[in-house]
Image (cartoon, rainbow, N blue to C red):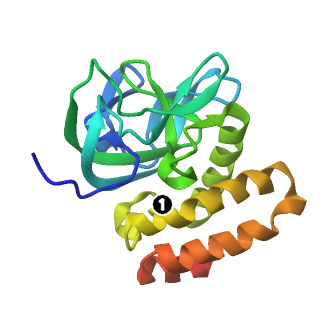
């Protein structure tokens, strides 16, 4: 078994997603590829890949790390995949994350997932309501389209510990700001701190150019 080199909540690169009638492994996706997913009203859609990034390797349960959010119904929500799976043996996998213009992507076994994990929103945040998640996805998609997909690559960060420490405040304030534009003051300071302390110098300079 390889030692883990990742640490973020992600998806195994071998996971298959649908592109038309073909199944493509996530590790082979490129920006601009069209894949199957679901929209904000849970309508089936063809979705465009807007960012794809590698996050080293780590333990997965099936195709997902324990902290990655997957969609569940009754009521609709995003819930961490968890590590308590009696029917799944954990294995080590190369990790990837994918952002599409749809809130949910469908994998070949029918699981619905997005780009987020509790590493960003806080280890105590085991669930996001559907409305909270939609606000976050909308905000993150907006940022990716404006600045690029480097946020979804392990090499953009100094270390994952800092991301896990500073991410939850950004996540919380992002939801607050997206609900009401008058509540965006704290998001700016939380984001600035995240950019300054979590990103590598090269990526930080790149971010400063676009914001």
How many numbered badges does the structure rendering display? 1
> Which residue is label 1 attached to?
164
Q: Between residues 101 and 62, which one lies in front from this camera angle? A: 62
Q: Give the position of the C terminus as an image quadrant.
A: bottom right
| Residue at position x 50%, y 78% in the image | 197
Give the residue furthest to the left. 1
Q: Is residue 8 left or right of residue 163?
A: left
Q: Is residue 70 left or right of residue 153?
A: right
Q: Between residues 12 and 45, which one lies in front from this camera angle? A: 12
Q: Is residue 151 above or below residue 96?
A: below
Mark 1 element type: helix
Q: Give the position of the N terminus as an image quadrant.
A: top left
Q: Quadrant of residue 159?
A: bottom left
Q: Is residue 190 above or below residue 35?
A: below
- Mark 1, Cα crowd under 10 Å, few <14 / some 14-19 / many 20+, is some
Residue 34 position, x and y percent, is: 47, 35
Give the residue furthest to the right. 182
Q: Is residue 161 left or right of residue 171?
A: left
| Residue at position x 28%, y 38% in the image | 60
Residue 151 position, x and y percent, is: 48, 62
Q: Is residue 167 above or below residue 51?
A: below
Looking at the image, can residue 50 be seen? no
| Residue at position x 57%, y 58% in the image | 144
């Amino acid at each position: 078994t390889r030692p883990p080199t990742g640490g973020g909540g992600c998806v195994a690169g071998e996971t298959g997603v649908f592109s038309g009638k073909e199944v493509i492994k996530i590790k082979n996706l490129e920006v601009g590829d069209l894949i199957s997913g679901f929209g904000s009203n849970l309508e089936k859609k063809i979705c465009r890949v807007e960012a794809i990034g590698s996050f080293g390797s780590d333990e997965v349960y099936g195709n997902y790390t324990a902290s990655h959010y997957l969609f569940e119904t009754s009521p609709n929500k995003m819930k961490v995949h968890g590590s308590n799976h009696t029917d799944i043996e954990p294995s080590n996998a190369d990790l990837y994350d994918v952002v599409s213009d749809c809130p949910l992507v469908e994998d070949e076994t029918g699981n619905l997932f997005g780009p987020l994990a509790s590493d960003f929103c806080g280890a105590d945040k085991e669930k996001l309501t559907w409305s909270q998640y939609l606000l976050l996805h909308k905000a993150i998609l907006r940022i990716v389209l404006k600045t690029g997909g480097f946020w979804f690559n392990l090499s953009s960060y100094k270390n994952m510990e800092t991301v896990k420490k500073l991410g939850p405040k950004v996540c919380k304030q992002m939801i607050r700001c997206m609900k009401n534009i008058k509540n965006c003051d704290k998001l700016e300071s939380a984001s600035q701190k995240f950019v300054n302390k979590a990103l590598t110098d090269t990526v930080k300079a790149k971010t400063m150019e676009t914001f």
